[in-house]
Image (cartoon, grey):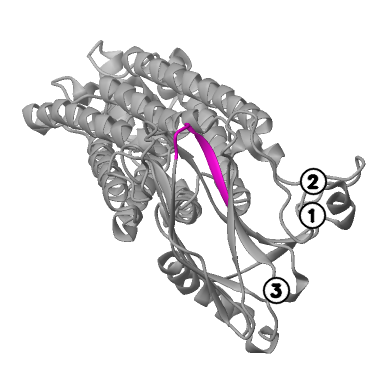
Amino acid sequence: MSGLELRSALPLILFAWLLLRGEGSIHEYAGVRFVSRGNAFVIHGGSEGIYSSRPTYNFTGAPANGDAFIRFEKIKFQRPREFSNFSSGLIQAVVFEVDDRETIGGSAYGGQRAICCTADLAKLGVCTQGEIIHRPSTKNPDWPKVFGVSFKEDKLVATLQPKSIEITKTGMYNLYFIHCDPKLKDVTLGGITMWKNLTGYLPGRMAPLMNFYGIMSLAFVILGIFWFSQNARFWREVLPLQNCVTLVITLGMFEMAFWYFDYAQFNRTGVRPTGITIWAVTFGTIKRTVARLIILMVSMGYGVVRPTLGGLTSKVVMLGVTFFMASEVLELVENVGAVSDLSGKARLFLVLPVAILDAFFILWIFTSLSATLTKLQAKRMMAKLDIYRKFTNALAVAVIVSVGWICYELYLKSIDVYNEQWQNAWIIPAFWQVLSFSLLCIICALWAPSQNSTRYAYSDDGSEEFDKDDTLTLIKPSPMPKDVRAGLETRSLHGGSGFSLPSEDVEEEKRE
């Protein structure tokens, strides 16, 4: 396949991958292969933060709706026919809370840490050779949960019995399927596991976001009522810039509503609705793109001190399209079909283009603002200068807060290697939504439709010194016809009203 054909096929490949990947808190495994890790072969079955249910001492294996649990259903391991002529060792499922991670694996005499029991460790009597090394947790002797199944001779499939594990302690839980037999390296895994929190199937990291997006939906409705009522009241005075703000508010309403329904459906069924998620991501990406373009155009003075962007229009549109594409891919990969409470390393590769484009937006915005403020101050347009100063201060505060928050995020990620702070992870996406909404409210306050809206609009009728002076510098006086000039000079000599000529010109005329 040529490079051009590959680039053309990439959107289709991405869309198909989004539709086929595992969804929701129901983790589905279809032909997943084991990966070699040290002396073990491992499949990561999932990681989720789970809020505990109250302990029930008569737990029957079929949790009630209010229970938090991890359930194994239809888990099957399949091996090739050519490797089916022997009975195998155990293929084990290991479920542990992140605080108990040190109870899995070990080493003999302080050597290299291993997951599977080695001959040296077996001699010490601490484990059985060919099985996983694990010890009871000091906090809860019943954990970690380790159970498994083995292949019988000539059998191609080994089925794990259905099992439910009740979660009685809030924490970040991890599931791994592990075996220690090199002869089983081609074994594949199929089936599902269901992870349920106390209030539904939403992973613990995402659970608070459902209520958050409900609140944000209400906030956008309130802002929309204010803005639309002002638009209806002063519809004759509405500027093009204010129509763009109307578009952003509308997109924000749709985005918040779709996110809320996405999480509500996910929480109820355990399966993330792909269609709703894609709509939520797309509306959000369009909103962020349009918002950045509006801020950039305002900073350039569009509609306020200049009627058009002139030759910059194509560059602004190109930047907007590029930002939309980069953000859309990032958000689709991050949200559509997200299963675990862990973010993939591939996300870093997709974040970089968006971060670079954001930095370019910021640089261009403040450069343009500086030029616009300088012109307004030089021409003494005090009303426009005042509103632009407030706008600049709001943007500066937003940028400073954003940089500070990014540093805080990096600090959190550096100290939280094992996602132990998962209960606070929802604050990170929520912060960016609140910050962008606050900036939108400031813009709405500064440029709200009113009976005086036109005083902030661009005017080419010569009433503003800025436009008048700029116009005069572009006009070169044409030579005056001789007969007209002579008539005017004669009127001036007789004391009439009109243009007065310098004395030397008068004397020259007399000599003629």
Residue shown at the point (34%, 40%) measured from the top left: 67
Percent coordinates x, y for residue 23 in the rendering: 41, 59
Q: Which residues are magenta?
A: 167-175
Q: Position of residue 196 (x, y in %)?
A: 38, 45
Q: Is residue 169 magenta?
A: yes
For the residues labelled 1 and 3, the Cα–Cα distance comes to 17 Å
* Left or right of 276 in this view: 80: right
Q: Circle 3 is placed at which residue position?
A: 184
Report the disc number at residue 65: none
351 above or below 382? below
Q: How many marks?
A: 3
Q: Is residue 318 left or right of residue 83?
A: left
Q: Nearer the viewer, mark 2 or mark 3?
A: 2
Q: Residue at 22% x, 13% y: name it.
A: 496
* Residue indicated by mark 1: 117
CB under 8 Å between discs 1 and 2: yes
Quarter of the image for the N terminus: give it: bottom right
* Amino acid on which disc 2 is placed: Val
Magenta stretch holds residue 356: no
- Of all residues, the one furthest to the top in this rendering is 495
Residue 479 in sight from this viewpoint? no
Kind of residue sitting beneath label 3: Leu
**Mark 1 in CB contact with mark 3 (< 8 angstroms):** no
Considering only order in the chain, which callout, 3 or 2, is on the residue closer to the N terminus?
Answer: 2
Where is mark 2, residue-wise? 126
Query: How busy is the neighbourhood of tag 1: few (under 14 within 10 Å), some, or many (20 plus)?
Result: many
Distance CA(mark 1)–CA(mark 2)? 9 Å
